[in-house]
Image (tube, rainbow, N blue to C red):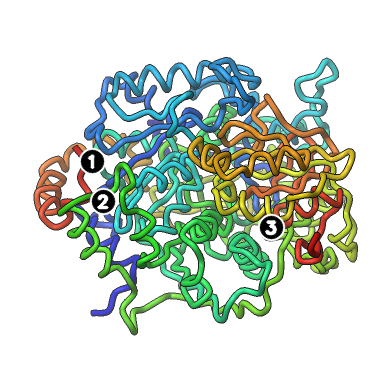
Amino acid sequence: MKKFVTHRGTAAPLLKINIDTDAIMPSREMKTVSKTGLGKSLFASWRFIDRGTDQEKLNPEFVLNQQEYSQASILLTGRNMGCGSSREFAVWALVDFGIRAIIAPSFGAIFFTNCIRNGLLPIVLDEQVIASLADYVALNPQANQLNIDLKTCHVIGPDGMTYPFELQSGFQVMLLEGLDAIDVTNKLGKEIDAFKTTDIQKRPWAYLN
Amino acid sequence: MKYTLFDKVWNDHVVTQQDDGADLLHIDRIFLHERTGSAALASIEEGERKIKNPAHVFCTMDHIVDTFPGRTDQTTMPGGSEFIKVTRDLSLKGNITLFDLGDERQGISHVVSPEQGIALPGCTVICPDSHTCTLGGLGALATGVGSSECEHALVTETLRFSKPKQMRVVFAGQLKSGVSAKDMILHLIAAYSAAGGSGYAIEFAGPAVDSLTVEARLTLCNMAVEFSAFTGIIAPDDKVFEYLKGRPYAPSGESWQQAKEYWATLSTDDGAHFDQEIVIDCATISPTVTWGTSPQEAISIDGQVPPLVLEEGDARRSMEQSLAYMGLKPGQSIQGLPIQVAFIGSCTNSRLSDLRIAAAILKGRKVASGVRAICVPGSTQVKQTAEKEGLDQIFLNAGFEWRESGCSMCFYAGGEGFVSGERVITSTNRNFEGRQGPGCRSHLASPATVAASAINGAITDSRKMGAL
């Protein structure tokens, strides 16, 4: 998994609440089992007009289509970001597009974990703070970039203000070191076997042959 | 120490606790489908890893398969047959149980799982599908995960979770006639927002929940994810035990007795702590319908689209976008709004009891002209049982299409879907933009409301249908 230690980049505001994973990655765009090459489908319903037809074109109003945000690597969104379907395709599309972090007041739980598993940092900040960051970035998106430091868990705004955020230390370590969750758990093989030995006595009915 | 139902199930699955407080939980059952399960299986294959306990892993074909009679591996969705083939090949290779096309056990994962006795009270169940929380209706600790987390569970039989906070939602009193579990959950989400359950596991309790059938409890828990909850759970009772007895993968003989003794301990102790408690008076719940593009944008069927949020900000912007997409204005009545499509199906409302309720309204009536009406049973078994009861004839005579089982048009995957601007009354769970087709306008409702609306060609309160 790709490490996340520090990142500096352009932040794009998409300040809508309840952005669902259908919007991030419409089901109709998921055409193969593959995890790669999905960035072209990111936010397809909003990014394109007449998607999939001869008349297909970019929607000039959509933030990521605007010149100053076209290289954005950070998203600023409203609360309950990534709600809805568990499809990890949504995160694979964000990563493929080049998004490294999302800052929102809250996240859909499954989406949050999917982000972590793919080296995309989900950051929870207060809605007011996000609104002010968005205002500041909008003054000059390419100059007013945001800095993120995962070692100290801070977002540093263009004005030099720092905003602390919290992340469970297990997730933090996993991202900082780019660890694979399965490898980490496989080191606990003995504990897992010991659990099962006891559990099968306690709940024999839960085990199928 | 006093424990909640959720505490009890959680604690009995903790393998080990991490330094940061997260727990590694043992996962008892894993369910896959060809849409996202295929990605997990393919990733295991690529990483040259192995499924640790194939006996506990099940898979179905539901998301991509067509639901036309006589369907094959070829799908109207472009690329669909690849998902089907990968799932089939890797299920065989991984030695897991697959309910393939043509198998009598095939159907929507969260319908099949209880039906086959795979999900059980006091078990942890995961599936790479957000509606896995449905199974909390049996008293299982069930939650949706991504494909990577699913792969982790397949390879290690465990998953790491931070224990969520706990909320109890008490439905006090009894439901009014004509009001269903679907109306309960839409009412809750409308009152407390689509993020209202964020960070919580939710126990649904109270007299109205006790009175629900097992199938209705599955409907109630199904949309816990639309409330942003980690999951929903309901204490298992005699109704659940009766429901599970004799199902193919449920315990039997001596094992059944042991299970029942254990399950009988699965209720919240008096005085156990909840971080939040919500009480809803069931007298205030009416048939409920969504007007917008989030499940929280729901109102009583005799209500009006609410006024615009006054304060500038994310909420107002989102509401304006919802109204524009849905072609509605504040103050507009939801009842009487003309619809072009009526859809009964999905893991929310496609079980036998749902079809019976709809059929009772449809019997002897005809779908309004110009309305396309479709019924997709939740499983092949539901379909066959419904046919034995003659429900298929009632649907067909009314003018409904009667389909093979699958998720079907709950979402648009590039195959079948509805037309831009079409208004759909639907028994499904998500009214997101484009969910059932680009530009398509979805109104979530109960099967009774969908059936009544199909007849009238406009959103209709089923209680006003009267006797024939």
Q: Quadrant of the N terminus of chain A?
A: top left
- The relative height of residue B243 versus residue A56 in the rendered view (above or below) is below
- Given this view, does label 3 or label 1 mark the residue nearer the observer? 1
Identify the residue shown where x is 70% and y is 52%. B444
Where is residue B394 drawn, in percent x and y? 70, 44
Asked whether the beta carbons under mark 2 and mark 3 sit within 8 Å of each other, the answer is: no
Q: Calculate the distance from the C-alpha at mark 1 to the C-alpha at mark 2.
A: 9 Å
Q: Do labels 2 and 3 share a chain?
A: no
- Left or right of residue A63, residue B427 in this image: left
Q: Which amino acid does label 2 sit on?
A: Leu
Q: What residue type is labelled 1?
A: Thr
Judge from the rendering whether residue B313 lies leftward or rightward of residue B456; answer left or right. Answer: left
Q: Nearer the viewer, residue B360 or B420?
A: B360
Query: Would you name the residue on which mark 2 appears?
Result: B24
10 Å neighbourhood of mark 2: few (<14), some, or many (≥20)?
Answer: many
Q: Which of marks 3 and 1 is nearer the N terminus?
A: 3
The residue under the point 80% across, 49% down is B365
Q: Whole-percent x and y of residue B449?
A: 73, 57
Q: Can residue B389 be seen in this view?
A: yes
| Residue holding disc 1 | A185
From the viewer's perspective, is residue A16 above or below residue B116?
A: below
Q: Which of B278 and B395 is in front in this view?
A: B395
Does B55 sit above or below residue A79? above
Find numbered disc 1 in the image and state the secondary structure of the residue it sits on: helix
Of the pair B403 and A65, the residue shown nearer to us: B403
Q: Name the residue under label 3.
A: A131
Task: Give the number of the mark in front: 2 or 3.
Answer: 2
Q: Disc 1 is attached to a residue of which chain?
A: A
Task: Evaluate whether label 3 is on the same chain as label 1.
Answer: yes
Furthest residue toward bottom: B271
Percent x, y for residue A111? Answer: 50, 45
Cβ atoms under marks 1 and 2 closer than 8 Å: yes
